[in-house]
Amino acid sequence: MENLPHLRSMLGATAKLWAGEDGVRVEPGRYVALSGAPSVDYNVIVCHGAGENLIAKSVEEIKARGVPALIMVAGQATGEVQELVDAGWVCIGQTGFMGRELDPATDVPAPVPGIRQLEASELDGARAIMADTFGLTPELALVALPPDATGGEGQSVWGIFNEDGELACTTIGARAQDTVTYWGIATPPEARRQGHARRMMDYVMAYDAQLGARYVVAHTTPYGEALTIGMGFVLLERWQMWSRPRWVLGRA
């Protein structure tokens, strides 16, 4: 997977799921995904190119927008992080940028009981699981899984149900050109370690391969990195995460 700039940009394009059409811009060397929500996790700019003052421009854009945010730095942009230090930003960790190639000849969805796309009337239940899994407030759960998630172009919400008909795991898929991202794989505590996520994701990735997706990308936590590696992903690179101290104090 040598086309890293393209894959980074496509991840940004899929962020319209939670940032909205007006909140996302994909530009040479960076992408902007600002939802306006009061959380650094839903206001993100990723800088990965060189030159054109991408980091300085991103700092000013976030300042003008007046929202807590993250700037993630990858690729050639890592040589310009001193600009963030000078602006009073701090590095709060790293995230793994993960990827997997899809092949419609081999990634074929085999029937699995209980897996299907969710309808709009079922989104409240999926939001409750996401809020429980990721520690989201009701307001942020609505950002993560917006009301139009089931109707947006290239978007789908999936779930796997247990034998009692209860939602046991959910995820949201978003496609941009030849690339798909799954924004959150959420399983309630009582349903974990039963293989629900793996069965659901194997099916969903194969389903998207048949629709033309050739790559799956994600950025992950350390726990999520292990999960995605188990699904056939590889670590493409690590991104630095930067923010302002007042925005991330107490953040897990």
Image (cartoon, rainbow, N blue to C red):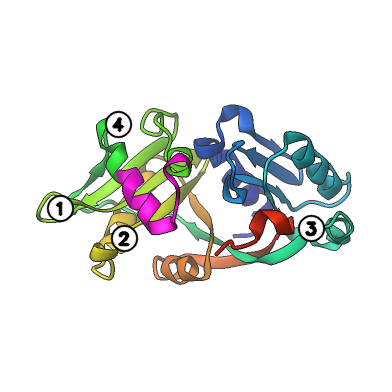
Identify the secondary structure beneath mark 3.
Answer: loop
137 drawn magenta: yes
Q: What amino acid does circle 3 point to?
A: Trp
Q: Which residue is mark 2?
A: 197
Q: Which residue is mark 1?
A: 113
Left or right? Give the position of 32 relative to 107: right
Depicted 185 relative to depicted 44: above or below: below
Residues under labels 4 and 2: Cα distance? 21 Å
Q: Residue at x 76, y 62 (%)?
A: 90
Q: Residue at x 23, y 52 (%)?
A: 160
Pick whichever of labels 3 and 2 is earlier in the sequence: 3
- Whether pointer 4 and pointer 2 mark residues with C-beta atoms closer than 8 Å, the reply is no
Q: Position of residue 94 (x, y in %)?
A: 64, 66
Residues under labels 3 and 2: Cα distance? 36 Å
Residue 89 marker? 3
The image quadrant of residue 149 is top left
